[in-house]
Amino acid sequence: MATKKTAGTTKTAPAKNASAKKPAAKKQPATKTAKTTTAKNPASTKTANQKMSQIDAALAVLKKARKPMSGKEMVEAMAKQKLWTSRGGKTPDVTLYAAILRDLRKGTGARFKKAAFQAGSR
């Protein structure tokens, strides 16, 4: 830093270097935020205002029925129990079947299990 002498006082001129230290900014107090947690079972965290997904509703229907069901039977049961309704699609049972097949590809982590077909069970 350069110093200048003038009439009995000494002044220090600021350095022209860009790397001069600036005073530290005051830290703002940390604000508290609510912690968000993820649920292991998303179907159990649904409230009355939230809609359940088609595949979650199918899982709930199967657990309640405790028997194998076809896609069409599951869609009808979901509508009857007011868990899920179609938005006007032509083949919601086929859409559900495709979603279940995608879930089955997960292997040991799959939520669904394919039941053996029994002739005459319908």
Image: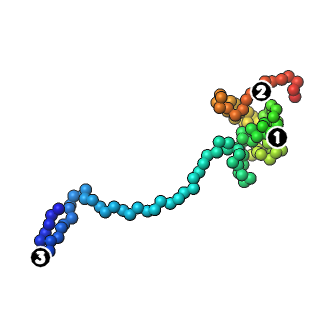
Residue 113 versus residue 1 in the image, above or below: above
* Residue 98 visible in the snapshot: no
| C-beta proximity under 8 Å, tags 2 and 1 | no
Instruction: Say the numbered circle drawn on residue 118.
Output: none
* Residue 113 visible in the snapshot: yes
Q: Residues within 10 Å of mark 1 (few under 14, many from 20)?
A: many
Which amino acid type corresponds to the residue marked 2 in the rendered image? Ala
Which amino acid type corresponds to the residue marked 1 in the rendered image? Ala
Tell which of 64 and 106 is nearer to you. Answer: 64
Percent of width and height locating residue 5: 12, 71
Marks 3 and 1 sit apart, C-alpha to C-alpha, by 96 Å
Which amino acid type corresponds to the residue marked 3 in the rendered image? Gly
Q: Secondary structure at mark 3?
A: loop
Q: Which residue is mark 1?
A: 77
Q: Which residue is mark 3?
A: 8
Tell which of 8 and 121 is nearer to you. Answer: 8
Q: Secondary structure at mark 2?
A: loop
**Which of the 4 image quadrants contains residue 15?**
bottom left
Percent of width and height locating residue 103: 67, 33
Q: Which residue is mark 2?
A: 115
| C-beta proximity under 8 Å, tags 3 and 1 | no
**Which of the 4 image quadrants contains residue 94?**
top right
